[in-house]
Image (spheres, helix red, strand yellow):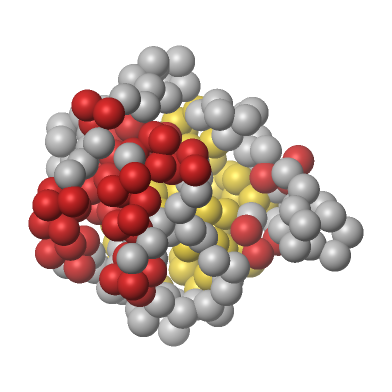
């Protein structure tokens, strides 16, 4: 798909991490995006963007990366982020990877060079609704396999400050939650390299 014709940004691109109200979508614009979001493929999609988080509030857009059982996306700071939900207070395995629907990212963020603001690592053109990808569903991308987990992925204060309160309400609405517009969590089942443009396939 063509996402406003913008090339993915580098980590140093100031537009990537700029959150200004001029980019905030109106409720009407967000509602109008639902038709396109619902047309995302259910079985075979595309990995549109890979984003590594080398530090808090830093983003590095990658052409390729590696998914690891121990690190998630290699070089990302997931394994340095403790969680009160894990038994030992360490990184939460069920939130090893944060994934967002590329069409939803375009709806709330606009051009592809602003998607990284959302904070997810993988942006895929695939229907990630609960009906299509319930917890336990496995996806093949590149040479890796990941598994969708039941850990909720909802909008927070940072999401609101970057995309606006209307966007937060949109993704956390009943429709937004059913379609997982904010995204889903997953963990690595089989490690391997991934590349932008790789096919994302829902496994039986």
Above or below, 194 relative to 37: above
Front residue of 157/56: it is 157
The residue depicted at 64 percent of the width and 55 percent of the height is: 96
Residue 26: x percent and y percent? 17, 44
In this orientation, which residue lies closer to the viewer: 5 or 161?
Answer: 161
Left or right: where does residue 14 sit relative to residue 71? left
Residue 161 can be seen, yes or no: yes
35 relative to 56 in the view: left or right? left
- In the depicted view, which residue is nearer to us: 151 or 75? 151
Q: Which residue is at 30% across, 57% downward? A: 170
Provide residue 166's location: percent of width, then percent of height: 28, 48
Q: Dividing the picture into quarters, in which one does residue 13 lie? A: top left
Q: Which quadrant is home to the C terminus?
A: bottom left
Q: Position of residue 25 (x, y in %)?
A: 21, 41
Q: Total marks drawn?
A: 0
Left or right: 61, with 1 as reference point:
right
Does residue 146 appear in this view? no
Residue in the foreground of this view, choosing between 186 and 89: 89
Residue lying farthest to the right in this orientation? 88
Give coordinates of residue 100: x percent, y percent: 40, 54
Which residue shows up at 51% across the image and 60% down it? 153
Q: Residue at x 45, y 49 (%)?
A: 122
Task: Please determine whether, in this image, residue 203 is positioned above or below residue 103.
Answer: below
Placement of 98 over or under 62, stated as above or below: below
Tell whether 105 sits left or right of 32. right
**Dividing the picture into quarters, in which one does residue 202 lie?**
bottom left
Q: Is residue 136 above or below residue 159?
A: below
């Amino acid at each position: 798909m063509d996402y406003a014709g913008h090339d993915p940004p580098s980590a140093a691109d100031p537009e990537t991490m700029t959150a200004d109200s001029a980019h905030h979508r109106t409720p009407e614009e967000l509602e109008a995006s639902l038709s396109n979001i619902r047309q995302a493929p259910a079985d075979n999609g595309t990995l549109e963007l890979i984003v590594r988080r080398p530090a808090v509030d830093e983003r590095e857009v990658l052409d390729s990366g590696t998914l690891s059982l121990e690190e998630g996306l290699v070089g990302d700071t997931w394994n340095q982020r403790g969680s009160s939900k894990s038994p030992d207070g360490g990184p939460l395995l069920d939130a090893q990877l944060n994934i967002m629907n590329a069409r939803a990212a375009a709806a709330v963020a606009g051009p592809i060079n602003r998607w990284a603001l959302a904070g997810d690592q993988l942006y895929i053109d695939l229907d990630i609704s609960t009906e299509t990808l319930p917890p336990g569903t496995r996806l093949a991308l590149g040479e890796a396999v990941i598994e969708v987990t039941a850990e909720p992925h909802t909008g927070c204060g940072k999401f609101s400050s970057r995309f606006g309160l209307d966007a937060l309400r949109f993704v956390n609405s009943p429709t937004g939650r059913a379609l997982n517009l904010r995204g889903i969590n997953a963990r690595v089942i089989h490690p391997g390299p991934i590349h932008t443009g790789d096919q994302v396939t829902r496994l039986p």
